[in-house]
Amino acid sequence: MGTVQRGTGVSEHAYDRDRLRQFLSGEAAGEGLSRRGVLRLLSAAAGLTVAGPGTGTAAAAAAEKPGIIKPLPAALLTVRGTNAETNWAALRGTGYHTPVDRFFVRNHTATPVLDPAHWRLTVWGSGLRGGSVEFSYDDLRSLPAVTSSVCLECAGNGRSYFATQQGEHVTGTPWTMGAVGAARWRGARLSDVLRAAGMSRRAVDVMPRGLDPAFTDGGTDYGRVRRPMPVAKALDDVLLAYEMNGLPLLPDHGRPVRLVAPSWVGVASVKWVGDIEVSDRPLFSPWNTVFYRLFGPAFPRGGSAPLARQPVRSAFELAPGAVLPAGRGHRLTGRSWSGRGGIRRVEVSTDGGASWRDARLHDAPRPAGWVRWSTRWQPQEPGPAHLLARATDTAGHTQPAVSAFNEQGFFFDAVVRHPVRVV
Ligand code: MTE
């Protein structure tokens, strides 16, 4: 095992700025992506609309057979194309960690069934001092095990609210707020694996790749899901997880081994990982050039830096349109989370945003986790109402009233207007 300096001293901000410059100047290594190639992929992706189950050929096929193996009872999960979203009402009373039966699934294609006994992880690339190194499942389990409670969330969570709250058309899976869950993950540190593989001081990027089928859409083959992350993140807190909530991973959640990249966009947590490229030059893939960046009038021409940390969000543990009797006290519950710190305050409005009061927080703020909260409400007048929850994280970010429009509908962080009916 060699020694690798933790962190390398490169801040995430500096990394993002450099990658953006490199991307805009057409400098892309590893994927052979020319600037022209990226622009072609971008325009292909612009037409890549998955407006909901039943729209578009991939989604239509998926609606019949989503490629997910675990049961998808309608009370717990809502199927959206190849994905399944957690129903927030099904989280009420479930404790801190999301039970695996209702944990959301985000699959670009379909869940592969992999046998841990035959699975191998290959670590390779110009950022190693020697040749490629293979790890078996037992090799990984023999490394020191770490257990960590971490939220996993899709960057596109809440995307449908761009249309329903802001009247804006965006592309992508129309999640409400159920593409998030918290689990107790157990696995080896990615940093231990990289050290054991002989990572050199020259390494700058690390790119894990999944063993699920290649993602194709609109006639474009984007290859297998893979996304680079800076060495600073890889050495910080990323796990190669083999357990979720005390049990071996289910196939849908990455069995036998997946990455868990705390606080970052869910796509960084590559499932069914089969190889990891370690490079001494910046790496690019469609998942940090075409997808998971912000395109729109509020962002630089050519798009934002690749998305990394998740914004602040909140949700009520209540079905949309829930019916609540008037003249009785109700305990409203929900959760808030942020990729940029713990949650230190949650305010709730039961009059559509005219007045706000602090909710009671039931968990201490912790990075990469969420807090459960509650408040009491005794509605008097029958009729439609909107409930709002607005969280603030320990870094001082408060959910805004409006989210910045972007074409692919990422990072909807505005306060959601949750409709209920008082009877
Ligand atoms: N890894 C692979 N190999 N293939 C995928 O489709 N989806 C990513 C990530 N890892 C994906 C993947 C995305 S976008 C998210 S949000 C998370 O997995 C979802 O993890 P989950 O399905 O366990 O909830």
Image: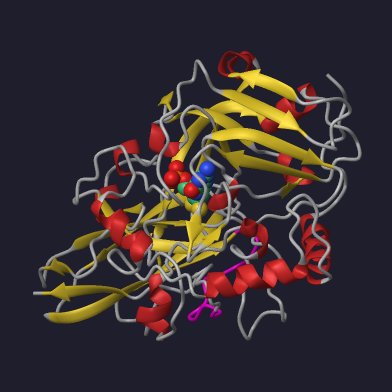
Left or right of residue 190: residue 328:
left
Asked if residue 108 is positioned above or below residue 174 in the image, the reply reads: above
Rendering coords of residue 43 (x, y %): 59, 75
Q: Is residue 405 left or right of residue 190?
A: left
Question: Quarter of the image holding residue 295?
Answer: bottom right
Q: Residue at x 79, y 71 (%)?
A: 24
What's the magenta bit mostly, secondary-structure-wise?
loop
Question: Picture coordinates of residue 232 (x, y %)?
Answer: 78, 45
Percent position (x, y) of residue 11? 82, 54
Does residue 76 appear left or right of residue 148 in this picture?
A: left
- The magenta stretch is 394-405
Instruction: Reply above or below: 33 against 415.
Output: above
Quadrant of the frame with the C terminus? bottom left
Quadrant assignment, res 316: bottom left
Above or below residue 318? Residue 353 is below
Which colour scheme appears in the figure?
secondary structure
Residue placed at 41% from the left, 30% from the top?
Answer: 113
Residue nearest the observer in this picture, 118 or 17: 118
Q: Quadrant of the N terminus?
A: top right
Vertical comparison of 318 with 238: above or below: below
Please indicate, yes or no, whether residue 363 appears anywhere in the rendered image: no
Residue under the point 35% across and 57% down: 334
Asked whether 403 falls inside the magenta stretch, the response is: yes
Residue drawn at point x = 50 percent, y = 69 percent:
413
The spot of residue 220 in percent (x, y) is: 54, 62
Say whether residue 81 is visible: yes
Looking at this view, is 363 or 143 the one in front?
Answer: 143
Q: Nearer the viewer, residue 415 or 101?
A: 101
**The magenta stretch spans residue 10:** no
